[in-house]
Image: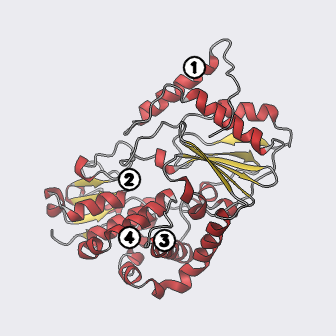
Amino acid sequence: MAPLQFLPFAEARRRPGATVVVDSILPRAALTLAHWRGAPTPATYQDDTSAGSALRAVAQPPAALTAARYVTANHFDVDGFVGVWALLNPELARRHAELLRLVAVLGDFREIDWHDARADHALQLVCWLNAEEKARFYEPFGAPARRRREDEASAEKFDWFLPRFAAIVENPALGRAAWLPEYERVRAAVAALHSPATQLRRYPDIGLTVVRTPEPLPYYALFGPTAGTDMVLSLYDGHRYEFEYKYTTWVDLESRPTRPRLPLDALVAQLNAQETSGYHWAADGVTDTGPLLRLQGRRLSKAQRYADPDQRPIYASSLGAEEMEELVVRFFRQHYAGLEPRRYWSWDEVRAAGAAVSGALAAPGNGGGIVTSEA
C-alpha cells in the first residue's frame, strides 16, 4: 500500500478517481469507506463506523486502495478524522485498531463500554479532539454561522490534527491540559448515572431506553448505557424531558438490525393537546442526524442541538414523568407493531414507513389503546 496524501474535499472533486473518500460520498471515487445510508462501501469493509471501515481496509487493503494517491472527507468529526488518519498511518492504525474503534463509536454514537480497559484512553482522545477543535477552530456544525462551507473550512482542521494525533494516541498525557475539563465532567456524570438517583428502563421491543436522572448529562455519559437501542427518552427532575433518535438510525449499522425512524408529528400533537405549561412540543425531521423532541423555547441551532443536554435549556412540562414515558412507549408500540427490524434501510424505505404511519393515523376511528409502561 503506497503512502496516501490528505486532499481537501474541494480539490478531491477534481481528482475522484485517485481519491479514497471517508465518511462522505464522492461520485466516481476510487474507494468509499463510509457508513452513510446508501454509501457504496464494498461489503467486505462495511462497519458500524466509517473509521471501522477504514481500519478494515488498512488490515486487508483492496486493489482500489493500493492504487489510490489521496484520501479526503467532506467534514471534520471524530469518526471521519480517525478513518482518514488510519489510512495515512496504517502501521499505527493496525497497532491501535481496537482503541481507535472505541474512539470512533464514542465520537459518533456517544456510546462506550466502561468495562473495556481502553475506555478511559478512548475518552481522553475524544475529549482532546473536541477541546482543540473548539479552541482553535469552531464547534461541530459551526461553519454556516461563520458563513463558511464545512467541506472547505474543515480542511484546516485536518491539516492541524493529522500530524499531531499520533503522539496523543501513544501518550495521552501530552494533551492532558486540553482533555481534562471535559473528561472530568463526563466521569462525574458517569458516576451520577451509576448512583441510586438514576433509573434505567429498556424497551427492547421498540428499541427505546428511558433514563430517569436528576439533571441533564453530557452525551458521553448519558448514551453509554443505551447501547443496543436507538431511541432515548431522558426524564429529568422538575418535569424536564427530551426524546432523541440516536445517530445509529441515520447510518447503515452493520452489527445489528434497526427500525426506521418514524415522523413524530402525531406524538407532538398529542403532547401539545395535553401541555399546559405555555411551551409547545416540537420535533426535528427524521433526516436530521439526531432528531430531538422537546419543549420549544427559542429555536436551537444545529450546533446547539448537537451539543450536550447539560449545555442547553430544557423547559419544565406540565406532564408527569410517568405520563410522558407512557405516551412515548404507546406511540412506538402502536406504530412499530408488525415492522420488523433489519439492516440497510434506504431513505426511501424510511420515508415509506413514515407515510404508512401517517396514513394509519388518518384512518377513521383510529385512536389506539393505552399500553402500560412495563419494560
In space, the residues marked 2 and 4 are separated at their CA atoms by: 15 Å
- Mark sitting earlier along the chain (2/3): 2
Q: Are marks 1 and 3 in contact (CB under 8 Å)?
A: no
In space, the residues marked 2 and 1 are separated at their CA atoms by: 32 Å
Q: Is residue 6 visible?
A: no
Residue drawn 64% across the image and 36% down it: 329
Residue 236: give x, y in percent of width and height. 74, 54
Q: Is residue 371 left or right of residue 76?
A: right
Element under disc 2: loop
- Mark sitting earlier along the chain (2/1): 2
Q: What residue would you read off at disc 3?
A: 126
- Mark sitting earlier along the chain (1/3): 3
Q: What residue would you read off at disc 2?
A: 48
Mark 3 neighbour class, 10 Å CA radius: few under 14, some 14 to 19, many 20 or more: many
Element under disc 4: helix
**Could you tell me the amino acid type at mark 1?**
Gly
- Number of marks: 4
In space, the residues marked 1 and 3 are separated at their CA atoms by: 43 Å
Residue 81: give x, y in percent of width and height. 39, 66
Residue 106: give x, y in percent of width and height. 48, 63
